[in-house]
Amino acid sequence: MSDLISKLEWRYATKKFDPSQVVSQDKIDFILEAIRLSATSSGLQPYEVLVVTNKAIREQIKPHAWNQGQITDSSHLLVFAAWDNYTAERINQMFDLTNDIRGFKNEGWENYRAMLLNTYPQRDAETNFQHAARQAYIGLGSALIAAAELKVDSTPMEGFDPVKVDEILGLKEKGLRSVLLLPLGYRADEGDWLVKLQKVRRSRDQFVTEIN
Ligand SMILES: Cc1cc2nc3c(=O)[nH]c(=O)nc-3n(C[C@H](O)[C@H](O)[C@H](O)COP(=O)(O)O)c2cc1C
């Protein structure tokens, strides 16, 4: 079978990157494509990914991310930024894109569009943002697996102040709010307290319930 599980065992939330090692563009593109192809609720893709390589900007982010060294030592910093709200315009854009790409309009699909238009924009912005943010987490999962597949190291991160990161990256003006950071790179030979420790997970029995 696939060697994916051994790659997922190899993956860990990297604590120290080797700042001299750069992830090649084709590997970054592979990871971004895995994120882009992720499932989202109603296919709305309500988030974007920023790829930050700019050192000065990463230095600015670091103090607002618990001073975590991975922000600046990694090769690339991905920022997952979710829509701050669902608007009729955003919903229509995705439904129109679907019709454009598929080359036809479908009554069931148009009824579904109307249902979302009658529901989402009327909800409060925070509820909509939280829903959009959950979709970004699915993309994070894809990114973690895709990076492991290429033996690229990564650190999923919620440990940052999103308001500050939004300010630094000008996300508010774009109707986005930062949700997750994902530094990518290669683990350092020394100085990572976690790298040699065993992975800890509850046993399958404690995790999976089979209902036959
Ligand atoms: C959503 C999310 C946020 C996390 N935030 C951080 C973080 O800010 N800094 C960090 O070093 N690790 C962070 N982690 C890593 C987790 O602590 C780690 O995934 C968990 O302990 C399991 O270990 P493993 O990923 O090494 O197998 C985060 C993980 C996830 C999924």
Image (cartoon, rainbow, N blue to C red):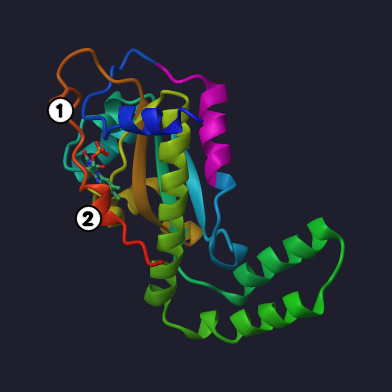
Does mark 1 have its CB less than 8 Å from ligand 1? no
What secondary structure is the magenta-colored segment mainly?
A: helix
Residue 54 seen from this side: no
Q: Is residue 31 magenta?
A: yes
Q: CA distance from mark 2 to mark 1?
A: 22 Å
Of helix, strand and loop, which one carries label 2?
Answer: helix
Q: Amino acid at mark 1?
A: Leu
Q: Is residue 113 left or right of residue 149?
A: right
Q: Amino acid at mark 2?
A: Gln
Residue 129 seen from this side: yes
Residue, x 37% and y 74% (percent of image)?
126
Horizontal and vertical percent for residue 157? 28, 44
Closer to the N terminus: mark 2 or mark 1? 1
Horizontal and vertical percent for residue 28? 51, 29
The quadrant holding residue 108 is bottom right
Q: Is residue 78 magenta?
A: no
The residue nearer to you, when weighing 52 against 146, is 146
Of helix, strand and loop, which one carries label 1?
Answer: loop
The residue nearer to you, when weighing 146 against 56, is 146
According to the image, label 2 marks what residue?
206
> 88 above or below 74?
below
According to the image, label 1 marks what residue?
197
